[in-house]
Amino acid sequence: MSAPLLDIQTMRLSVKTDEGMAQILDHVALTLPRGRILGLVGESGCGKSTLVRAVLGILPRGATVDSGHILFENEDLLRLSEQELAKRIRGSRIGFIPQDPYLALNPVFTVGDQLLSVMRWHAPAPPGVTGRRARMRHHRERLVELLRRVQIPEPEAVLDRYPHQFSGGQRQRLMIAGALACSPRLVIADEPTTALDVTTQLQILKLLKSLVAEFDISMLFVTHDFGVVAQLCDDITVMYAGQTVESGPTAAVLADPQHPYTQALLACHPDRAQSLLGIPGRVPSPLNAPPGCRYAPRCPHAIDDCTRRAPHFAETGAGHLVNCRLAETQPEAA
Amino acid sequence: MLRFILRRVLLAIPSLFGLLVLTFFLVRVVPADPATALAGENATPAQIAAIRHEYGFDQPLYKQFVVYLGQVARFDFGESAYSRRPVSLDIKQRLPATLELTITSLLLGTFLGIPLGTIAAVYHNRWPDITLRILSVAGVAIAAFWFAIELQLLFSMELDWLPLRGRLSSSMDAPPLVTGFMLIDSLLAGRWDAFTDTLHHLILPAMTLSLGGLATIARFTRAGVLETLQRDFVTYARAQGVPSRVLIWKYVLKNSIVAALTQIGLLFGGLIAGAVVVETIFDWPGIGFYTVQAILTADYKVILGVTVVIGVIYAAVNILVDLIHGLVDPRLREQL
Ligand SMILES: Nc1ncnc2c1ncn2[C@@H]1O[C@H](COP(=O)(O)OP(=O)(O)OP(=O)(O)O)[C@@H](O)[C@H]1O
Ligand SMILES: [Mg+2]
């Protein structure tokens, strides 16, 4: 198998807060093979967006990466300078689809201005096209074509409109076109359907799925909704309180969850992981998080060792990795 | 857009009307007996009665008001008791000098204040920001006359770079009067020497006058930019690789200047008030200087005329600011 497109290992990240250092990410691991859709699932606040921001190099001030690497096309993004990231990674090789398209668009500029501005810096132009004007004309044509592809009516006219003149679903289509505009290898979508109603959500998911194949891209799809993952994603990575707890092919993880957290999550809310009312205890604060497994205080199977043991992944099936003592002690037995 | 303009203009009418009512009452009603006040201390009752009749003070109040409106509409404020010239003529001659000074100060304050405020926000809590914060407090707190005198001492007396006072060197012939704005008139006449001379004269008073406005605009821009930097679209633009200088100076700034723009409209009133002090110090032949004289000699027609004219200009500036708002923010344009 060829090297994965995106490979994150032993990623630790802390943020300086008023009350001290908060360990937001702790031993996160995530692997996205080429041409696939990976669902990153976890409760609100578990650090999904922070991880995305780390990949894009747009962490908030006060955040520091303590260890780990983010290999994208065999290059460690954490070693790149801000200039390099801005110049040849963000927008150009990694496209981004935000959670709330309404807030993500600048209200006082036209949609065309905003989408074309990204293309102006990052979109490749075919060899024959030289000169600023010719390039911009080319970008404009490509954008119109993309807008048509994501089913925006009257794509030509749309470029001169302002964000508030679109519906939520249309805006998200605009963002999708924007993410694809510069022919990226990877598209990261951070809960792109959370702000939409169910019907629109379904249409957008279908669109995304078809685009991944058509444009030969890979996608990191962040969500807290297992239902969405089941529909869309080839693989799944589950996070809890800043740690990766389990990952593997979607079908395997959903059918046979290995980590007690995943099991509890799927048991108490088959479709949605938004609420964990069914699991006793609370998510630990990242401020003074215990070492070892962060789920241990709530885990029915926990023993003393759980809070001491360094996170470690055990493979319980083809590509199915679990960060849990249980999986280690019962190798392929159950 | 046309409807937007029209509506803004219509909205200004009530406040202008309010201004007229206010000035009318201040001048005609508040003094116990304006005729006595006008006639002076040693007037006989017959003289007072004559004045009362001449000025229409014996008419019912509403009739007086209608007459007053008519006068204002004709730009007729009567004759200055001091200069014995029509007030409107004095205003016409002096207003451009004041406008030239205030507009220059406003432009100076805007075009320095907005970039400085933006830089402060980008370097939030680091040295450029802290320096600017100290300076802007100083800018608001420093007395204009002290600053003016310091400037005069340094640039005129010590370094001899800039003239001490006035609007044009006495050795220089004034360009033919067209707009009354010396800079424009000298350009129209092709008088480069007069243009640079006026510009030199303008620098110190404009700097003095712009100080408070500059600080205010910088502060509001900084606050606006800081707020905008928190918005999601900034994160999105960064995530999509928009270079940070484009992001800040184009996308963030346009969202942030709305608050600063509102301030610019309000500042204009303060600038005209400030012009009184600055014109006196720099011997600038504007309306502020003229008003001070009028107040000192209780020349009420002058005070009235100046108040009305400045009120109208103030309203016009704020309409303009509203229109710029409409240009900046498409949502505002569509609300109507
Ligand atoms: N700038 C910051 N300063 C301090 N804490 C932060 C900062 N940014 C994020 N956090 C904390 O990091 C944790 C993870 O936040 P993050 O936004 O990554 O979660 P998420 O999984 O994306 O949640 P959601 O599903 O709500 O989007 C949260 O506990 C949050 O409070
Ligand atoms: Mg998030």
Image (cartoon, grey):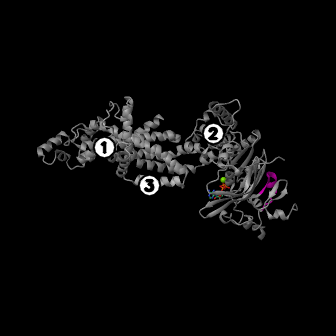
Q: Which residues are magenta?
A: A246-259
Query: Disc 2 marks which residue?
Result: A115
Tell me if residue B31 can be seen.
yes
The picture places residue A282, in percent across and down from the top left corner, at: 68, 65
- Answer few, some or many: residues within 10 Å of disc 3's Cα (few below 14, many 20 plus, some between 14 and 19): some
Q: Which residue is drawn at the image coordinates 65% and 62% (left, top)? A: A22
Q: Amino acid at mark 3?
A: Val
Read off the residue under disc 3.
B137
Q: Chain of mark 2?
A: A
Q: Amino acid at mark 1?
A: Asp
Viewer-nearest of discs 2 and 1: 1
Mark-to-mark CA distance, 3 and 2: 40 Å
Identify the element where label 3 is drawn. Answer: helix
Q: Is residue A238 left or right of residue A316?
A: left
Inspect the image, locate mark 2, and give the three-letter code of the amino acid beneath it. Leu
Residue drawn 59% across the image and 38% down it: A113
Instruction: Look at the image and say whether residue A187 sits in the magenta stretch.
Output: no
> How many angstroms separate mark 2 from mark 1 (CA)?
54 Å
Q: Is residue A56 left or right of residue B219?
A: right
Question: Residue placed farthest to the right in the image?
Answer: A333
Q: Chain of mark 1?
A: B
Label 1 sits on residue? B283
- Give x and y (percent) for residue A167: 61, 42
